[in-house]
Amino acid sequence: MSTDTELFPGELAMLRGLVRTLRVVVRPDDADVAEVRRLLHQHAGDEAAAVAEGKSSRPADATPGLNPRQARLLEAIRTWGGEWTTARVRHTYALIAPEAVQRGTARRDLAALHRAGHLVLVDAPDNRHYVLRRKDGRS
């Protein structure tokens, strides 16, 4: 992770906007989509680590009570959205976390984010997953 400061006011906001745009523009049939996805996951992990260390302009209260791995997962969920299963978490950790993560750890991390109010559990038959809680309290 770079320790450089913004070169101009708003640079960090601009970069976050670029990341959001890439999420929308990049299509699965693009040849370099795997590399772009890896870079986006890396960005999410680096930014979450900066928040955890207090080195980001993002509000520090965004992840109280979460360990750094859970904070990185929450940032990845915010970046990618969609349905989150244990398998998807393990795949994401393979991209953004330095340590290998067991299935039970991924399950506990999802449950911790749910208990902290960041995720909503969708417990449909044969389709148990979590989704990001919206600011209005809905999923």
Image (cartoon, rainbow, N blue to C red):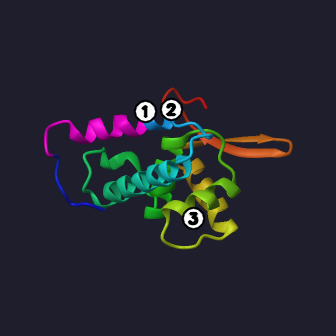
The residue that appears at 51% across and 49% down in the rendered structure is 37
Q: Amino acid at mark 3?
A: Ala
Horizontally, is 48 left or right of 58 in the view? right
N-terminal of the pair, mark 3 or mark 2, is 2
Q: How far is mark 3 from mark 1, CA to CA?
A: 24 Å
Element marked by disc 2: helix
Select label 3 or label 1 by which is in front.
Answer: 1
Horizontally, is 134 left or right of 13 in the view? right
Stretch in magenta: 7-20
Q: Are marks 3 and 2 in contact (CB under 8 Å)?
A: no
View extreme (left): residue: 8
Horizontally, is 103 left or right of 81 in the view? right
View extreme (bottom): residue: 99
Element marked by disc 3: helix
View extreme (front): residue: 31
**Mark 3: few, some, or many residues within 10 Å (few <14, many ≥20)?**
some
Residue 52, above or below 22: below
Q: Amino acid at mark 2?
A: Val
The residue that appears at 36% across and 53% down in the rendered structure is 47
Q: Which residue is mark 1?
A: 21
Q: Amino acid at mark 1?
A: Thr
Residue 98 % position (x, y)? 48, 70
